[in-house]
Amino acid sequence: MTDTVERRALTPGQLLSVYRAMRSIREFEERVHAEFATGEIPGFVHLYAGEEASAVGVCSNLDDRDTIASTHRGHGHCIAKGVDVSEMMAEIYGRRTGSCHGKGGSMHIADLSKGMLGANGIVGGGPPLICGTALAAKIKGTGGVSVAFFGDGASNQGTTLESLNLASVWNLPAIFIAENNGYAEATSSTWSVASDNIADRAAGFGMPGVIVDGFDFFAVYETASEAVSRAREGGGPTLIEMKFTRYFGHFEGDQQTYRAGEVEHARAELDCLKRFAARVIETGELARSDLDAVDAEVATMIDKAVDDAKAAPLPTEADLLTDVYARY
Amino acid sequence: MGDAIVGVVANPLSGRDIRRLVTQASVFPTAEKANMIQRMLTALDAVGVQRVLLSADLGGISASVFRAIGRRRSQDGRWPEVEFLDGQPIRQTAQDTVDAVRRMVTAGARVIVCLGGDGTARVTASAVGDVPMLALSTGTNNTFPVVREATIAGLAAGLVATGMVPDGGAATRAKLLEARVGDRVETALVDVAVSTERHVGARAVWDPAKLTELFCAFAEPDAIGLSSILGQVSPVARHESHGVTARITAEAALQVLAPIAPGLVVRVGVRAIEPMRPGSVHPIDARAGVIVVDGERELTFEPGEQPTVRLRADGPWCVDVPAVLAASARLGLLRRAR
């Protein structure tokens, strides 16, 4: 006889927070897309637009005890875990007021105070990190859960597979979120992932593997909720594969000659924000005016973040050697 | 004999949902689905099927069969000619199954085999028309599809497709449940349930506390899935013309332990058990919620929409594998001269 866990429905207030987070990510990314084209932003950016339901659906189940590790496409994970949007924008502009004082940029935004271990320029760099934090949480008995987001490209990296093994052997409170957006840079995952479904690999490591429609917030939320409960209660790790599409190229400037029509179809028919809004209005849980107010508030916030970032000072020569070495 | 064409549709996503996480449900790797199709091809060839239409997918099944055909050596024996139904957009949704099955029907398939769980069989049934289907289990609940060796399924499908086993008795007609919300309609082969959850979410149902009503086309005592709730208290066989319905409530005097999903045996309260007559329309009581078809949340409804459920006698024709092979034995179809 198995006990079933009574799932609590999200309150209207929680649904509004979910929408605000997803809208913030979308607006942030659309704006960075536009600003990057002006040449003012240094380095590379990889945009998360289209994938919002994954970051927000997972992170809505997390709290201050929990840590996440991200990818080169990390802005969405940062926002979903509560990293300050203005500091993120300043970081992307390489300003002293940024999350990492302007020395990291898009691919290294981190905020340990929020449990955000960092965006990561190394493909497959995140999973080993969360084995460490999950082990720490287990030993200290904090009840904390660690989540690694990674892509279909990273799913083929040794670091990821070693981490899945270690997490299972150590029975860690770890959750592996494979964000399969169909392409590792320009290489199709249907060609490069030998098991075809990344989730299929879970069985080989003795953990559950689940596939979720990554465009559907409610499906992601419910699945992540079960995985987080399982991890907190000592049940061990889970692998969840999100299937979806990124709306922009691998990086800004990618000509995307390897795909056609997918983004238009996804934006029109599958979009997580559109589907979420339509659904909560249909059920009467939220009103159109509630959502419109959030849209306006988020637009203002992003405008200000960009203005503040542009006006903020660059790091000085003296900043070059600060925070470079750590004393243990 | 004419063209003995068999259609095979395989769902790359079956057996992958949240039940792996909440109830330790089984995992069916893509590689095994592709292996099953290859074993079936061998059997289809053995009984004289010349042409197979195979669904195309992005999950790796058709690609794996395609590669296997290329690797096959002359001494491995023959396979029928396999035509991959590509050339149409693949959406990675249930619509892909509908599209593939319709193309098979149009192309003159005599039997359509589907590989998947209850959801795949349900979607195949909605598009198959009068062509007999054979549902093989590669999914989760598997109340409708059977767990059976693909080689045997291939022999049975081939014996029917070639006309060697005559139509009478080779296939039986299944019942069908039709759930309707306004002009939105979903069909189920086994059960329709009503949940007071507001969202489709992860689709599967594993918490009986949210269920209010249950309708079963049949309810077998050894079933897995929601129909098992009535299978132990008011069983109805597949061949009987009626179905059965009941209210689900924790306070009911009648309590039953039911295996509502693999790895999940839960206590469910049942009251107001009544037969369902073919054609009679049953209005749903809940004001708002989700209609669950064959174990998956599918149709949402809001106050004022008044959904209904109806039992229909005109479900899909299903190949009766034991009956086909028994007929083959009787007629000596697999005997060969020395």
Image (spheres, rainbow, N blue to C red):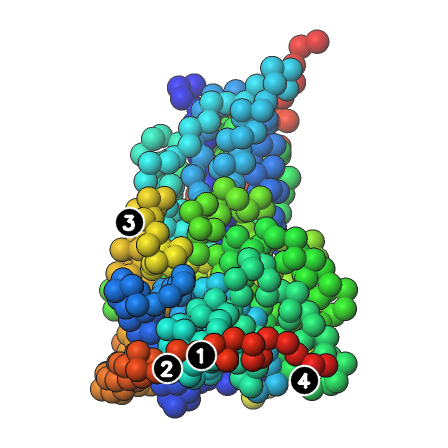
Q: Is residue A18 among the parts visible in the rendering?
A: no
Q: Chain of mark 2?
A: A
Amino acid on which disc 4 is placed:
Gly
Question: Where does label 2 land, which residue?
Answer: A313
* Secondary structure type for disc 1: loop
Amino acid on which disc 2 is placed:
Pro
For this view, does A251 lie left or right of residue A122? left
Measured Cα–Cα span from mark 3 to mark 1:
46 Å
Mark 1 or mark 3, which is nearer the start of the sequence?
3
* Secondary structure type for disc 3: loop
Foreground mark, 1 or 2, reads 1
Q: Chain of mark 4?
A: A
> Residue A179 in the image: x percent, y percent?
49, 61
Mark 4 or mark 1, which is nearer the start of the sequence?
4
User: Residue A316 has which mark?
Assistant: 1
Amino acid on which disc 3 is placed:
Gly
The image shows a total of numbered marks equal to 4
Q: Residue at x 70, y 72 (%)?
A: A132
User: Residue A261 has which mark?
Assistant: 3
Measured Cα–Cα span from mark 2 to mark 3:
42 Å
